[in-house]
């Protein structure tokens, strides 16, 4: 592990390209524990590339941002901390591919990897604080439930269990068995954990005890993560069907059928202003009315969409495996801006008041701003 902590503080005060005040945090996958992908941070109408940070490996991870430091992993198993000016702060070698976005909790960076381990590092130095081992690979990100007196970390694994860990010690608090792989990230909403699995069930779990309260049987592989808005959960499936589920009744309120056999939905929806946005491997980004599922618009890209969009005001920001980053109008679905990065994009963006970041599959971290 390389540590460049002293250099970081010098660079942060002298060479950072981005120095405007504002909300500089996107500390977890999708920006918040409900996984809804909406933000009040402004997205520029015509962003400019500020800098590029190159790694030595392919990456399908997504970045997170805390205290003007960007954290992300790659397929070589390296977890990077990069300053807001594009300089390396430190890196940690986990030795196994990191596909999920990390999560920042206090001064810890917590992330899973394909060796089935969940690790916590010191966010300032990159030193290992603890590691927790599951019995199969971790592909989805962890999430955090904040109780009255404590916080708990929850993460799914391909060992069929949802695991709950004490973030201070790395010790298991509980684990809940399901009937198949857990691929996505659990959502946290109103003191409940909501998650789907490849057993086709969307479950609600009480965080302190780990007891399953109820579930909806969707009857299809749920490979994506649910996004929560009000009393609704929105989630896609491996079969390409998109569901809106009422969390009080656990009944499907509406569903959007798959376009064709290639319509796998791995992306997590983004929700705002009565609309829900989701990308599909059929190369389309779809916009639905959250109340009744009416399709408001669709936008075709030149490649599969596996990353998730972010909504800011009327702007919908996302990447495609056609090698482009797009901004569309939430209202109309019309393209406002695009940028050709030259390689596929599976990453979901991280957005702050100052800039946004996204990864390319060839391992470049790109920062955009005014």
Image (spheres, rainbow, N blue to C red):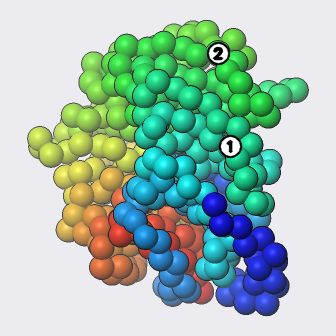
The quarter of the picture where the N terminus appears is bottom right
**In the rendered view, does 59 fall on the left or right side of 185?**
left
Few, some or many residues within 10 Å of mark 1 (<14, 14–19, 20+): many
Query: Any mark on residue 292, and which?
Result: none
Few, some or many residues within 10 Å of mark 2 (<14, 14–19, 20+): some
Q: Nearer the viewer, residue 95 or 46?
A: 95
Q: Quadrant of residue 331?
A: bottom left
Does label 1 or label 2 sit earlier along the sequence?
1
**Extreme left residue here?**
261
Residue 242 in sight from this viewpoint: yes
Query: Any mark on residue 120, and which?
Result: 1
| Residue at point 64%, 15% (across, down) | 174
Q: Quadrant of residue 118?
A: top right
Classify mark 2: helix, strand or loop: strand
Residue 290 in sight from this viewpoint: no
| Residue 295, x across and y down, in percent | 29, 48
**Badge 2 is on which residue?**
174
| Residue at point 41%, 55% (across, down) | 75
| Residue 123, x across and y down, in percent | 74, 56
Total number of numbered discs in the rendering: 2
| Residue 223, x across and y down, in percent | 35, 35
Q: Quadrant of residue 145?
A: top right
Q: CA distance from mark 1 to mark 2?
A: 18 Å
Q: Nearer the viewer, residue 196 or 336?
A: 196
| Residue at point 43%, 70% (across, down) | 56
Q: Nearer the viewer, residue 237 or 175?
A: 175
């Amino acid at each position: 592990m390389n540590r460049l902590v002293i250099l970081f503080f010098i660079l942060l005060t002298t060479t950072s390209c981005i120095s405007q005040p504002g909300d500089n945090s996107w500390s977890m996958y999708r920006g918040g524990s409900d996984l809804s992908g909406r933000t009040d941070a402004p997205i520029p109408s015509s962003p400019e590339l500020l800098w590029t940070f190159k790694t030595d490996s392919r990456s399908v991870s997504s970045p997170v941002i805390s205290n003007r430091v960007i954290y992300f992993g790659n397929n070589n198993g390296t977890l990077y901390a990069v300053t807001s000016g594009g300089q390396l702060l430190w890196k940690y070698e986990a030795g196994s591919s990191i596909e999920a976005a990390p999560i920042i909790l206090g001064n810890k960076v917590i992330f899973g990897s394909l060796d089935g381990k969940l690790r916590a590092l010191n966010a300032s130095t990159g030193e290992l604080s603890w590691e927790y081992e599951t019995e199969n690979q971790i592909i989805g990100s962890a999430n955090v439930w904040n109780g009255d007196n404590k916080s708990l970390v929850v993460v799914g694994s391909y060992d069929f269990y949802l695991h709950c860990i004490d973030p201070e010690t790395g010790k298991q608090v509980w684990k809940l068995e399901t009937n198949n792989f857990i691929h996505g990230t659990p959502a946290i909403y109103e003191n409940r954990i909501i998650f789907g699995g490849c057993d086709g069930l969307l479950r609600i779990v009480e965080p302190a005890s780990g007891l399953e309260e109820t579930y909806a049987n969707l009857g299809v592989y749920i490979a994506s993560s649910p996004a929560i808005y009000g009393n609704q959960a929105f989630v896609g499936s491996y079969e390409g069907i998109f569901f809106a589920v009422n969390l009080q009744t656990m009944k499907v309120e509406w569903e959007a059928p798959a376009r064709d056999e290639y319509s796998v939905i791995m992306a997590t929806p983004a929700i705002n202003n009565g609309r829900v946005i989701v990308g599909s491997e059929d190369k389309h980004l779809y916009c639905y009315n959250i109340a009744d599922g009416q399709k408001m618009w669709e936008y075709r890209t030149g490649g599969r969409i596996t990353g998730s969009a972010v909504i800011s005001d009327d702007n919908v920001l996302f990447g495609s495996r056609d090698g482009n980053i797009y901004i569309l109008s939430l209202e109309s679905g019309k393209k406002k801006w695009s940028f050709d990065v030259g390689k596929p994009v599976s990453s979901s963006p991280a957005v702050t008041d100052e800039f946004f970041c996204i990864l390319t599959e060839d391992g470049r971290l790109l920062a955009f701003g005014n």
